[in-house]
């Protein structure tokens, strides 16, 4: 019992130190900001005027403000597992509506990332519990495009579904009543699809930026055509390698 109590006290002390470190970091950050700009926080308290809405994954390695160099008040953020835009997800849709109709953001960025665990689970259909129900949407995209995705090997296959998932989420966002109504009213709202590389810290533009329904559908078809062509070339390379080995 004494050993157990001793371990408990040690564990509690360590937890308290970890939490206190976060508070200390916050105070240091606040002091640094105030030294650079004494009016920053008073001004920030009055209003927020972000130009961007970021829809991303909850992965701790992907920090939107950090990797884009944005300050508080410059980036409106919605995050969930797999950076998904689901038409029945009132949490995400509420954020999108507030961003578009109240904050009047000009750009909505759907950003996924390579090495995404939820995408890997969607491919392997690994059973991990409740989260499988959420990831099922990504699993559906895998099955929808499986003919082409399976032409790729190893991590490239994983990367391609990461990208396709982003493209599908951009389409979902553009087809939402919120964005559709904004476009019909002439409100300029751009939707972008980005992918972040945790291996090098760089963001890659998938070049599917759209500000109209026509452009949205055209970019969707164009990107899928590129995937199909890449899959075809990958398959041909595999056949050549097999022939060389034989």
Image (tube, rainbow, N blue to C red):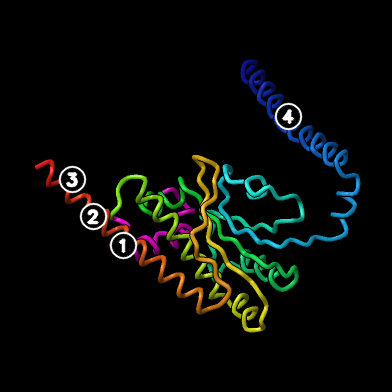
At x 51%, y 75%, the residue is 215
Q: Nearer the viewer, mark 1 or mark 4?
A: 1
Crowd band around label 4 with a 10 angstrom C-alpha radius: few (<14), some (14–19), many (20+): few
At x 46%, y 66%, the residue is 168
- Where does label 1 land, which residue? 229
Question: CB atoms at circles 2 and 3 under 8 Å apart?
Answer: no
- Describe the element under mark 1 as helix, strand or loop: helix
Q: CA distance from mark 2 to mark 1?
A: 10 Å
Vertical placement of 178 versus 164: above or below?
A: below
Does residue 129 show up magenta in the picture?
yes
What span is colored magenta in the figure?
128-150
As drawn, the residue found furthest toward the left would be 246
Is 164 displayed left or right of 20 in the figure? left
Q: CA distance from mark 4 to mark 2?
A: 55 Å
Q: Residue 39 at what x, y percent from top left?
A: 90, 49
- Where does label 4 land, which residue? 16
- Describe the element under mark 3 as helix, strand or loop: helix
- Describe the element under mark 4 as helix, strand or loop: helix
Reading the chain from its start, which is encountered first: label 1 or label 3? 1
Q: CA distance from mark 1 to mark 4?
A: 54 Å
Reading the chain from its start, which is encountered first: label 2 or label 1? 1
Q: Residue 129 at what x, y percent from top left?
A: 45, 50
Q: Quadrant of the N terminus?
A: top right
Reading the chain from its start, which is encountered first: label 3 or label 4? 4
- Describe the element under mark 2 as helix, strand or loop: helix
- Where does label 2 land, which residue? 235
Q: CA distance from mark 3 to mark 4?
A: 57 Å
- Where does label 3 land, which residue? 241
């Amino acid at each position: 019992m004494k050993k157990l109590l001793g371990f408990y006290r040690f564990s509690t002390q360590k937890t308290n130190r970890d939490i206190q470190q976060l508070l200390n970091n916050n105070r240091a950050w606040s002091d640094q900001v105030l030294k650079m700009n004494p009016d920053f926080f008073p001004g920030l308290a009055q209003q927020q005027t972000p130009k961007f809405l970021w829809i991303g994954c909850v992965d701790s390695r992907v920090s939107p403000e950090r990797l884009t160099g944005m300050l508080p008040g410059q980036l409106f953020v919605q995050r969930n597992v797999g950076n998904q835009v689901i038409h029945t997800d009132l949490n995400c849709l509420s954020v999108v509506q507030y961003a578009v109709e109240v904050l009047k953001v000009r750009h909505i960025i759907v950003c996924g990332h390579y090495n995404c665990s939820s995408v890997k689970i969607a491919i392997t259909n690994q059973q991990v519990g409740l989260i499988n129900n959420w990831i099922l949407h990504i699993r559906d995209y895998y099955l929808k495009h499986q003919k082409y995705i399976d032409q790729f090997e190893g991590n490239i296959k994983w990367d391609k579904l990461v990208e396709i998932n982003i493209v599908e989420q951009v389409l979902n966002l553009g087809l939402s009543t919120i964005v559709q109504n904004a476009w019909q009213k002439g409100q300029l709202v751009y939707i972008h699809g980005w992918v972040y590389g945790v291996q090098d810290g760089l963001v890659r533009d998938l070049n599917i930026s759209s500000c109209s329904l026509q452009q949205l559908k055209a970019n969707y078809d164009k990107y899928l055509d590129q995937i199909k062509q890449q899959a075809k070339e990958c398959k041909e390379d595999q056949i050549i390698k097999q022939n060389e080995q034989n």
